[in-house]
Each structure stands twice: as C-alpha cells, then as structure tokens.
Image (tube, grey):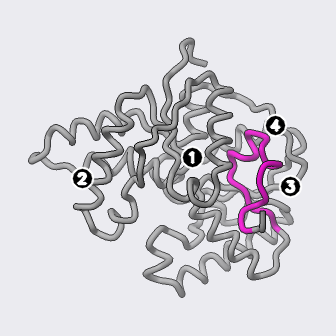
Amino acid sequence: MLQTRPRVALFVTCLVDLYRPTVGFAAIKLLEAAGCQVEVPEAQTCCGQPAYNSGDRTTARDLARNVIDTFLPYDYTVVPSGSCGGQISHHYPGLFDDSDPHYRGRAEALAAKTHELVSFLTDVMGMQEVAARYDGVVAYHDSCSGLRELGIREQPRKLLGSVQGLTLKELVDRDVCCGFGGTFCVKYPDISVRMVSDKAKDVVETGADTLLAGDMGCLLNMAGRLKREGAPVKVRHVAEVLADMTQDAAPIGEPK
C-alpha cells in the first residue's frame, strides 16, 4: 500500500445519493480501511452522462466544469460506478476543444486521477483482502462501462474471494449488457426488457441467492426484472458486501 494517506474525494453519483446512500457509506469505509483521507465535496452534481449520451453537449460541459472545479484539488477522485467513472476519466477531455484549452487541460488532469472504487482499492492502494463476511452464494455481473472502458473484471472477484462465507458462481454471460445502458432503456424499451429478462434467467440458473455488480443503474434494472419474475434473489452493490454493511440496508428493490 502507499506510504502516505492520499486525500481522496468521493464522487457519490446521483443514483447512490437518491436511491442507495449505503453504497456511499460503504465506499467511505473501504477507502478509510485502505488508508485514505476521505472527503465528500458538497458542491458535487451529476457528472453529465445523461446529457452527454443524449447529445446535449452544452449541458454536459456545464456540469463537467463544476465537477472539474470541485474535484481537481484532491489527490484522487473515486467513484462507486464504472459508468460515472468512465464519463469523467474517458469523456471529459473530449468535451472541450481548442477553443477552451483551460478546461481541456483541467479535464485531462482530473481524468488522470479518477478511478472506479474497487479498481482504486486494488490497483492503486494495493488492497489484497477485506475484513468481511457474507454467508451466501453470489453471482457477479460485469457492467459494460466498468468492463469495457475501465478494464474492471478481476478486481472485484479478487476482493470477493477474501470475504468469509461467500461462494462465487459465474454467470454464463457475465459480461453481456443487462439492457440498462443509461438512456438506452428509455429509447429502446422492448430491446432492453428482452436483454434484462435474459440476464435474470442467467442469474437464476446459477443457483445464486445474491446478485452483485458495481453500478447502481444495472443493479436497479436487474433487481426490478428479478422481482417481476418472482425470483428470490437478493441484489446488492459489491461495495456493501466488501464493507460488511449488508445489515444496514435491505437488498436493492426490496422494502426497507
């Protein structure tokens, strides 16, 4: 692990803030256990991904400027979401062309020190294991942005392997999209429903009692489909299990 305590800003994300604050608290617990000094900037807003995906570059740039100004002073920005993390680290610089070199340079600087939570813990902070217990059989879904933009595949599995009582069963199509895709599920609802139905079937066939992933959008989508189909599968963000905080909130999609 690093010898000094890096000053880390947690980018909470809209869905964690509005639907699942437990994930934010779990992220803080994990980051502090890894030796980080964690702050949650109050001025943070949406990263702008919905606007970006809808082609509204003006709104996306406005939101990006606020995020850049808010998070750039920290050593690292950490996000419990591959999609929001990918937006900041991969798409922010491209929002600013040569007509705005000041913000393009700042966007590039922030992108270089922005990481998804689990990959930051393992790849940057060198975390090898967690002090957690989860008695159950889990399946893990590889969310598209985390996998394809950020290369997150083995990192969560590495830490899950250290959780006492946990057995991991792999999905047949573990890296196939669940059909959420941000605005994709709104633009193409019929295709989205078919995709998430296939994913739910895959989850049930593993025999797992719990489904984990690293993105709240995917988790909400899959939890909704599993519930509609009457599947007795609990759905949680991977950070909740790694931080040993599953007792602090009902599974996603279930009443509190």
Label 1 environment density (alpha carbons within 10 Å; few <14, some 14–19, many ≥20): many
The mark nearer the N terminus, 3 or 4, is: 4
- How much space separates mark 3 and mark 4, taking CA atoms? 15 Å
Report which residue position mark 3 lands on: 137
**From mark 2 to mark 3, how far is it between C-alphas?**
42 Å
The mark that comes first in sequence, 2 or 4, is: 2
Q: Residue furthest top?
A: 3
Residue 131 versus residue 143 in the image, above or below: above
Quarter holding residue 101: top left
Q: Quick check: 66 above or below 206?
A: above
Q: Amino acid at mark 4?
A: Ala
Residue bearing the label numbered 2: 95
Q: What's under tag 3, amino acid-wise?
A: Val
Which label sits in the foreground, 1 or 3? 1
Q: Which residues are magenta?
A: 233-253
Residue visible at 46% across and 47% down in the picture: 85
The spot of residue 69 in percent (x, y) is 31, 38
Q: Give the spatial CA distance, label 1 vs label 2.
A: 23 Å
Element at label 1: loop
Disc 4: which residue = 132
List the single residue furthest toward the left. Answer: 99
